[in-house]
């Protein structure tokens, strides 16, 4: 078990990483003194896999509980779902101190965190991420959101959880494709901040794909550590520090949007986004060819895509310019100088972006 | 014109009070550098009264504009309205820097502030309050919210505006009853913090009821000053300092809820709530009889109610115990020791509350 502390001026919390740590759930939560009624938001699949265990452990520790099941899909990240969950909470929130547990992947984490942020202007919540992607990335740092028809994550809040419990045992039901998707984010952390981690991934990626406990515990805690240090310095993405976490994400989001979120999953799109950003870096003489090659080799080796299939360039470019990170007409991309070193570049010419993307299609 | 500054660690803003200051709207907003697209949320009545003027002034100052009209009623404070407004914003938010203007009373201010807080995890907004109640109270301090069927203001955020423009000229279309409702909040400020203001109100209340510009400017800026100082010390109501602003509100809310928000308006309910709190104070030997009498005389003199009509005691008590300020089974009331001095009291016995309310029915 490894414990990472995330310290902010107003609120600090622990990210606990380990195999089977859910068994001590009751103890961890009781120590926080955040309430006596655990309102668990999850989906039916996760409830079957580990929800009943969580329920038993919470009751054993003296908590009242209620489960709310949302659909296992991005459609759950909607204002409509927010509204139904929050009305259900209000209905059951009588003379109790209620807190929320987000038990699931990124969709459930983002949705639950947002609900916790707005109900009664903020109640405590806990993240128990059940995917590799959520464990290494979305469960940490308090970025919560739901989608609009006009774009993903357009409605949300910065609102920190009170605890993140990353139990690597929960990952055992993931498909290989889901594990790879998480691995894409892990490669991102290595590429922006940690050449050592990159080297580790080159040698040990198979252990991650095979869900070996020690490898998982190492990469999840390592990424949590990197993210915690970044979030501490720039909680609300105001100082350009947190921005580097978007490496691969700006173009990745454009790829996801261009295919209406069908086809490539988030990790796959991020992998492609990182490669396109490196191509742009090479074109701008910011990234060395061999750095790009190293990144491309790792992405290819772990089984993530390196070429964009069946999406017209025009569609990606159009989606790119609707990204919410655009301020006015200006674009902003995170590029890498070297493995572990980033550079934020503004106002890259559309021609350069178009050419870089064109080569991957 | 008077300017009050509200200074918070992360964001400071001005509250500008005066007659006809809307004329300089463009100048005030341009100075903030918050965007080029003003998205104005208001209702059709206010649009007729001053919306077209605001529109003209914004365009003259070079802003793009769009109006969104909501219903002139508490029903607009709903997740459904949030959803429609926010989708409309997303639809028009292309390559522009958008900010929100809340042009209206408390309903529009609370709704617009909440929308600003969650769209793209927060965009700037400005308050142009059009009622006396909103000018002295709800437009300041960043408490934003919408209602659920289970209770008022159950969904919201603490999110500060970038400017509050309180133009007393906008008050000229208010009914006498609406002015009195605002006066109830002004009496609250005097009762909790400012014996001088209380004395002023005793002598000059008629000037306020008759909307005399100098009297209005004085009381609006005085109350804004008091609220700003309190909010600065306890932005998120965590330290028990901001709590004193709830004087008259806990029981006031219960009265409003008991009659399903028909009948007494907010100011009238707050007036009754202040009197009940004073009755409780007298019963607990915290408030002197003559203090209560002074308060009751002023409330009566300005034409606000002093007796609760046609609401059964049981209903108020029941609503009282559903208030979101209740933590678990404990209650908390703001009482006054004297005009200008408060005392927060926890766990007042239900018998005392019941008896105090009973005398007013």
Image: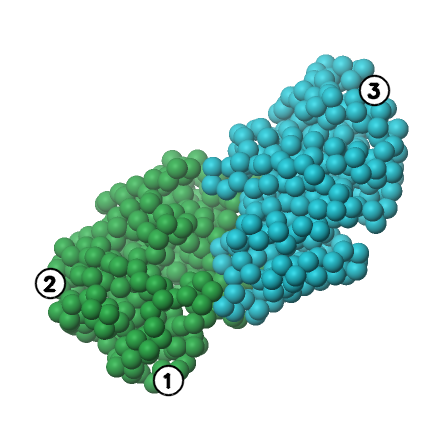
Chain colours: A green, B cyan
Q: Residue at x 69, y 53 (%)?
A: B103
Identify residue for label 2. A203
Residue B16 at x, y percent in the picture = 65, 41
**Quadrant of the rendered structure where residue A219 is?**
bottom left
Residue A316 at x, y percent in the picture = 38, 78
Q: Are marks 3 and 1 on the same chain?
A: no
Circle 2: element type: helix
Residue B307 seen anywhere in this rendered image of the structure: no
Q: Quadrant of the N terminus of chain A?
A: top left
**Closer mark to the observer between disc 3 and disc 1:** 1
Circle 1: element type: loop
Identify residue for label 1. A312
Residue A303 at x, y percent in the picture = 21, 73
Observer-nearest residue: A89 or B285? B285
Q: Are marks 2 and 3 on the same chain?
A: no
Q: Residue at x 34, y 56 (%)?
A: A243
**Quadrant of the rendered structure where residue B90 is?**
bottom right
Observer-nearest residue: B112 or A143? B112
Observer-nearest residue: B42 or A295? B42
Whole-angstrom CA distance, mark 3 to mark 1, is 77 Å
Observer-nearest residue: B266 or B257? B266
Q: Quadrant of the C terminus of chain A?
A: bottom left
State yes or no: discs 1 and 2 in contact (Cβ < 8 Å).
Answer: no
Q: Residue B293: which numbered mark, if any?
A: 3
Residue A339 at x, y percent in the picture = 18, 60
Whole-angstrom CA distance, mark 1 to mark 2, is 35 Å
**Closer mark to the observer between disc 2 and disc 3:** 3
Whole-angstrom CA distance, mark 2 to mark 3, is 82 Å
Q: Residue at x 37, y 50 (%)?
A: A239
């Amino acid at each position: 078990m490894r414990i990472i502390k995330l310290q902010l001026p107003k609120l600090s919390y622990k990210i606990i990483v380990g195999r089977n740590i859910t068994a001590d759930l009751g103890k961890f939560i009781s120590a926080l003194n955040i309430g006596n009624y655990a309102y668990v938001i999850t989906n039916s699949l996760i409830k079957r896999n580990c929800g009943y265990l969580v329920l038993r452990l919470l009751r054993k520790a003296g908590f009242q509980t209620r489960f709310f099941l949302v659909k296992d899909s991005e459609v759950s990240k909607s204002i409509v779902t927010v509204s139904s969950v929050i009305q259900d909470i209000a209905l059951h929130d009588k003379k109790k101190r209620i807190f929320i547990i987000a038990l699931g992947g990124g969709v459930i984490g983002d949705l639950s965190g947002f609900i916790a942020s707005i109900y009664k202007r903020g109640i405590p919540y806990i993240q128990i991420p059940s995917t590799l992607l959520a464990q290494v990335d979305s469960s940490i740092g308090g970025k919560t959101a739901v989608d609009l028809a006009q774009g993903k994550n357009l409605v949300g809040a910065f609102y920190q959880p009170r605890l993140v419990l990353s139990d690597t045992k929960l990952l055992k039901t993931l498909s290989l494709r889901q594990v790879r998707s998480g691995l894409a984010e892990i490669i991102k952390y290595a590429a922006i901040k940690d050449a050592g981690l990159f080297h580790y991934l080159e040698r040990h990626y198979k252990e991650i794909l095979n869900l070996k406990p020690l490898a998982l515990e190492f990469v999840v805690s390592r990424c949590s550590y990197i993210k915690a240090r970044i979030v501490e310095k720039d909680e609300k993405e105001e100082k350009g520090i947190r921005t580097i976490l978007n490496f691969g994400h700006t173009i990745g989001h454009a790829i996801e949007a261009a295919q209406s979120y069908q086809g490539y999953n988030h990790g796959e799109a991020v992998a492609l986004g990182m490669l396109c950003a490196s191509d742009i870096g090479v074109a701008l003489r910011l990234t060395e060819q061999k750095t790009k090659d190293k990144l491309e080799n790792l992405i290819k080796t772990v089984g993530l895509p390196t070429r964009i299939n069946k999406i017209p360039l025009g569609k990606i470019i159009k989606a790119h310019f609707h990204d919410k990170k655009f301020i006015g007409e200006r674009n902003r991309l995170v590029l890498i100088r070297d493995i572990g070193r980033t550079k934020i570049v503004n106002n890259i010419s559309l021609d350069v972006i178009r050419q870089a993307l064109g080569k991957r299609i």
